[in-house]
Image (spheres, grey):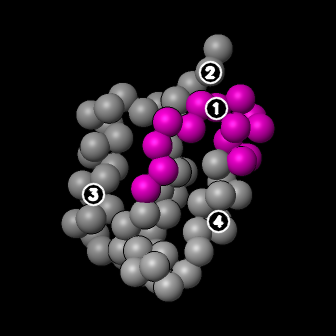
Amino acid sequence: MSYSSAVLTVSDGVARGTRTDASGDAAAALLEGAGFEVVARHVVPDEVGDIQRRLRAYVDDEVRFVVT
């Protein structure tokens, strides 16, 4: 059985496009290696409202496990 998961990268630099999302890539690879299905990956700036909105969207989409 595979559980749905998501990777949420919180980074101003990645959100602006001035940095690559190496940590998000690593997190997704670790999840997949552990048998999780990564159904979503998003990047948001380090702003509480943006983070809350994305996490709530994952709940609405019934994502079972989120890594930030």
Q: Which residue is mark 1?
A: 36
Give residue 4's position: percent from left, percent from top: 52, 30
Which mark lies nearer to you, 3 or 2?
A: 2
| Magenta span contains residue 62 | no
Nearest to N terminus: mark 2 or mark 1: 2
Q: Is residue 23 above or below residue 53?
A: below
| Magenta span contains residue 34 | yes
Q: Is residue 27 above or below residue 20?
A: above
Residues tagged 4 and 1 counted as in contact (Cβ below 8 A): no
Tell me if 62 is positioned left or right of 33 in this view. left
Residue 52 is marked as 3
Residues tagged 2 and 1 counted as in contact (Cβ below 8 A): yes
Count neighbours of disc 3 (C-alpha within 10 A) and say few if under 14, some if 14 to 19, many if 20 or more: few
Give residue 33's position: percent from left, percent from top: 77, 38
Q: CA distance from mark 1 to mark 3?
A: 23 Å
Residue found at x 67% / y 41%: 31
Give the amino acid type for the residue marked by disc 2 in the picture.
Ser
Residue 2 is marked as 2
